[in-house]
Image (cartoon, grey):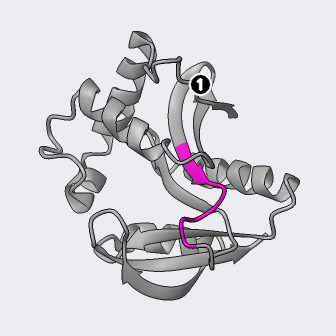
Amino acid sequence: MILEPLSLGPERELPGELLTELTALYASNRDFHELSGEFPDPDDIRPEQVAAALAEDSADPSAEVLLARSEGRLVGLAITLGHHPDPADPDPWIGLLMVDASAHRRGLGRRLAALVEDRFRASGRTALRLAVLENNPGALAFWTTLGYEVIDRRKDRQLGRPCAVLRKEL
């Protein structure tokens, strides 16, 4: 698996073929989107919705969208924040880690998370945080298996959903 940073054009537009791939990736994760409530209809995720979500997620100057490819195929993505909006929070964050649902339970999520951790470790960062929706026990189990520990419980900044905040020393 390789990671490639997503480069948006000057108008922050995604090339059509890439947007098609990303829409398929998002649409494959219907159950997550039903839990998160980020799309109005998790059974009908549209390219313009994915483009808008990615534009919003990458608006922060420290944000990075990383595409995960295996054998040329888009199998996942990670959205990271180098700096949290709260200046008291020193750690970078994983805002989203998503693997194509048809490839779940094959170790791709674990490999993608390790690649993200390695990128931050290589840049001198010493820990990483993320938030898991309280209504997503499967995600909480995944992240705790990877060594992340719950350090707080609070509402997310975007939609006010109850979350567990996790942290891992790198």
Q: Mark 1 sits on what residue? A: 7
Identify whether 72 is placed above or below 82: above
* Camera-nearest residue between 10 and 67: 10
Q: Which residue is rendered at x = 48% and y = 53% of the image? A: 96
Name the amino acid type tagged 1: Ser
Q: Residue at x 68, y 75 (%)?
A: 168
Which residues lie in the magenta part? Answer: 78-86
**Residue ID at (13%, 46%):** 40
Which SS class for mark 1? loop
Question: Residue, x 50% and y 42% (percent of image)?
Answer: 58
Residue nearer the viewer, 28 or 10: 10
Give the x, y percent position of residue 60.
53, 48
Farthest-out residue, bottom: 152
Nearest the camera: 113 or 153? 153
Q: Is residue 59 visible?
A: yes
Percent position of residue 37, x then y: 21, 57
**Residue 71 picture location, percent across and down:** 63, 21
Quarter of image, res 44: top left
